[in-house]
Image (spheres, rainbow, N blue to C red):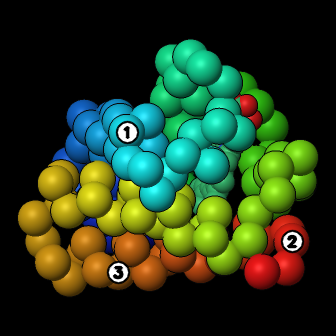
Amino acid sequence: MTETMTSHFQLIGGQPAIDRIVDLFYDRMDTLPEAEKIRAMHPADLTGIRIVLKKYLAEWLGGPKTYSEERGHPRLRMRHMPFPISTAERDAWMLCMTGALEEVITDRMLREHLTQQLFRVADWMRNVEG
Ligand code: HEM
């Protein structure tokens, strides 16, 4: 990326915006009945994963590379192998994420673009039929 290009990280409002998205995302996972099954895959205390996802998304959007520095190559699909993810789990994850994005990203074009990109990642995470 050249210095004249603006990253999505900057466009959405930097780390404070990502922190809000991730907090809203896990709040939704914690409360939405549709997310009960994926919530149960996570530890009771979400503090740790909130911190990790904030760093991951910052890097994914072109911000600081703290995630990789601390945790190495994401190998995200491999890290999700212990959890059975089918279309239902993918859609529950996206339901939590789209609500969070709607609250934080006001630019509709940017929001729809990121939603699509995240859907691709979530879809790629599927590891069981259904
Ligand atoms: C599709 C449905 C998904 C399910 C059910 C799911 C579930 C999980 C679970 C259970 C964990 C482990 C949490 C822990 O041990 O504390 C995890 C970790 C993680 N997930 Fe997902 N996830 C999904 C999709 C995604 C997507 C689309 C992304 C990124 C855009 C993502 C990013 C991460 C990251 C960064 C971690 C931590 C990895 C690490 O240990 O470094 N997940 N996920």
Separation of residues labelled 3 and 1 (CA atoms): 26 Å
Give the SS element for disc 2: loop
| Residue appearing at x 16%, y 54% in the figure | 103
Q: Which residue is mark 2?
A: 128
| Residue appearing at x 35%, y 54% in the figure | 9
Could you tell whether 55 is left or right of 12 in the image?
right
Could you tell whether 7 is left or right of 93 in the image?
left
| Residue lying at the far front of the rendered structure | 33
User: In which image quadrant can residue 28 be found?
Assistant: top left
Q: Which residue is mark 1?
A: 31
| Residue appearing at x 86%, y 71% in the figure | 128
Characterize the local packing of mark 2: few (<14), some (14-19) or many (20 or more) Cα atoms within 10 angstroms: few
Residue type, numbered disc 1 = Thr
Separation of residues labelled 2 and 3 (CA atoms): 27 Å
Query: Which of disc 1 and disc 3 is earlier in sequence?
Result: 1
Task: Please indicate, yes or no, whether residue 72 appears anywhere in the rendered image.
Answer: yes
Mark 1 or 2: in front is: 1
**Percent position (x, y) of residue 14?**
28, 44
| Residue lying at the far left of the rendered structure | 106
Characterize the local packing of mark 1: few (<14), some (14-19) or many (20 or more) Cα atoms within 10 angstroms: few
Q: Which residue is mark 3?
A: 113
Characterize the local packing of mark 3: few (<14), some (14-19) or many (20 or more) Cα atoms within 10 angstroms: few
Task: Please indicate, yes or no, whether residue 18 appears anywhere in the rendered image.
Answer: no
Query: Which of disc 3 and disc 2 is earlier in sequence?
Result: 3
| Quadrant of the rendering where the C terminus is positioned | bottom right
